[in-house]
Amino acid sequence: MNFSSQLLEDAVNEFAKLPGVGQKTALRLVLHLLNKEQEEVSHFGRTLIRLKEEIKHCQVCHNISDHNICSICSAPKRDGETICVVEDTRDVMAIENTNQYFGVYHVLGGLISPMDGIGPSDLNIDSLVQRVSTTSVKEVILALSANMEGDTTLFYLHKRLKDFQIPITTIARGIAFGGELEYADEITLGRSILTRVPYENSLIK
């Protein structure tokens, strides 16, 4: 792609680094910003800078938050004795959109993937174990994507948590194997939460 301006090319190259954004889409976005008023573009830039500089992770569940304790963990109406374990913030948002779950969350920050060099120590697993051991927890729901990495993580978490003698459940397989939670429709995901089963029942005998 030939550019008439080095500034334009640099901006397009930066946008093209975003996931799912190719050169043509990046060019369209940059040209869109160029047609906006200066204040709008400045506000856009300031918002991104504030996001990077001021965003926090909840000290309890590791979800992205504006404060040290996120709005879900601090909400008095949430069931703090039920913890739903998810891969990342996108999964929290997906489950919240179902309006079928009223407990709290624990964000792992990824899945165990030896091929990618990601092991248990790279995830927020120790803090989950500590949370279960030091607070009143009646159920842990393992809501992870139905793929190889998700199943590996499920198995490891069950092994770490089974001695606490609390129900460990997993969402029903309404989601096809290889699917990710964030792409599941709200009805399917909501039903999967409501019809969760004990983890042992989900294993192939």
Image (spheres, rainbow, N blue to C red):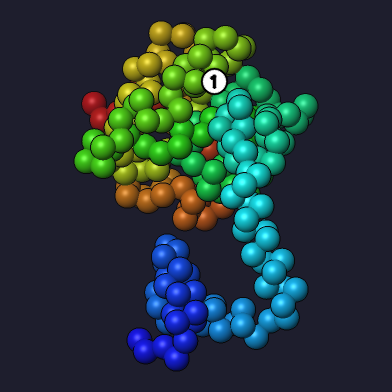
Q: Position of residue 58 (x, y in %)?
A: 62, 32
Q: Position of residue 102 (x, y in %)?
A: 66, 33
Q: Quadrant of residue 10?
A: bottom left
The vertical placement of 27 against 18, above or below, is below
Q: Look at 32% across and 49% down and name the residue there.
A: 178
Q: Position of residue 107 (x, y in %)?
A: 51, 34
Q: Is residue 93 left or right of residue 172?
A: right
Work out which quarter of the rendered image holds the N terminus and state it.
bottom left
Q: Position of residue 123 (x, y in %)?
A: 41, 30
Which of the pair 194/25 is nearer the observer? 25
Q: Is residue 59 left or right of residue 67?
A: left
Amino acid at pointer 1: Glu
Q: Quadrant of residue 202?
A: top left
Which of the pair 45/93 is nearer the observer? 45
Q: Is residue 14 left or right of residue 112?
A: right
Dot 1: element: strand
Work out which quarter of the rendered image holds the C terminus and state it.
top left
Q: Within 10 angstroms of label 1, few (less than 14), some, or many (20 or more) residues?
A: some
Residue 77 in sight here: yes
Q: Look at 45% across and 91% down and name the residue there.
A: 4
Residue 142 in sight here: no
In this figure, which residue is indicated by the disc labeled 1?
139
Q: Look at 26% across and 37% down and name the residue there.
A: 117
Q: Look at 45% across and 28% down and name the residue there.
A: 124
The vertical placement of 204 against 115, above or below, is above
